[in-house]
Image (cartoon, rainbow, N blue to C red):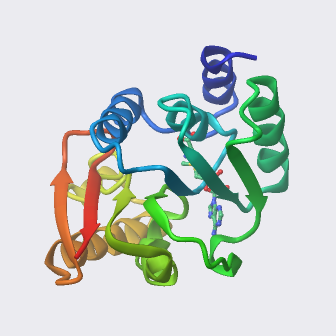
Amino acid sequence: MNLEEILKEARSEKIPVMLDDGIVFLCDFIKSHEQIHRILEIGTAVGYSAMQMALLRDDIQIDTLEINAELAEKAKHNIMDNDLEDRIHVYLTDAMDYQTDRIYDMIFVDAAKAQYGRYMEHFLKNAKEGSFFVFDNLQFHGMVDNPSLTKNRGTLQMIKKIGVFREEIQKDPRFKTDYYADKGDGIAISRVL
Ligand SMILES: C[S@@+](CC[C@H](N)C(=O)[O-])C[C@H]1O[C@@H](n2cnc3c(N)ncnc32)[C@H](O)[C@@H]1O
């Protein structure tokens, strides 16, 4: 399957993939930062965003982490189908259990939304001065700014955590953070100082 077919299938199976304008924004960011070669992605799903990023330049290498075995298998299959297996490596793991000495130029965080602070702390040792953390879903479909959009208790707890993280990351002196409320589902880019 090509990328378009992978996206179509994921959407029809209700597998969450990044919103179209979010992926365009992310890809434009990588294109305009040629120093980005090594990327860690937290949350592979079916490999769609990893493949979009890898296709930008031949010198991009991606490690991507997925906790769900079925999705990780699907992603590996999709990546092989598109001849990207030399540059995208899928790891079936909980991101919090993944340990590596590798240093990444960009860490794209797109997994469990309530865990963003934990992921960031866990992977800070794998970043250097000038590396970027990219966080998607900081609006959570508008609910973070407007909690009355949901009555679900679990969702309310999650959006509260996202809101706290969003505020903290912008104040965190270890980063210079730019927040783009209108891109994707709310994207923050934090440069390690
Ligand atoms: C929004 S989807 C990723 C979409 C993908 N980045 C894209 O746009 O094509 C989030 C994924 O994170 C995975 N996930 C959730 N918690 C995780 C964890 N602790 N470690 C690794 N993956 C996790 C989920 O199974 C899900 O497939």
Tell me: residue 110, above or below residue 168. Answer: above
Please indicate whether residue 63 sits to the left or right of residue 86 in the image.
left
The image shows residue 117 at horizontal and vertical percentages of 40, 78
Residue at x 81% of width, y 31% of height: 80
Numbered-mark total: 0
Q: Could you say which is closer to the camera, residue 138 or residue 191?
A: 191
Above or below, comparing residue 167 to residue 106 in the picture:
below
Pinpoint residue 127: horizontal percent, then vertical percent. 43, 73
Horizontal and vertical percent position of residue 27: 38, 34
What residue do we see at 60% from left, 55% from top?
43
| Quadrant in which the N terminus is drawn | top right
Residue 150 shown left or right of residue 87 in the figure: left
Residue 2, position as x, y percentages in the image = 69, 16
Question: Quadrant holding ligand 1?
Answer: bottom right
Quadrant assignment for the C terminus: bottom left
Task: Please report the residue visible at 67 percent of the width from the left and 15 percent of the height from the top.
Answer: 5
| Vertical comparison of 127 with 111: above or below | below
Q: Is residue 109 above or below residue 116?
A: above
Residue sitting nearer the eye, 137 or 191: 191
- Residue positioned 43% across, 80% down in the render: 124
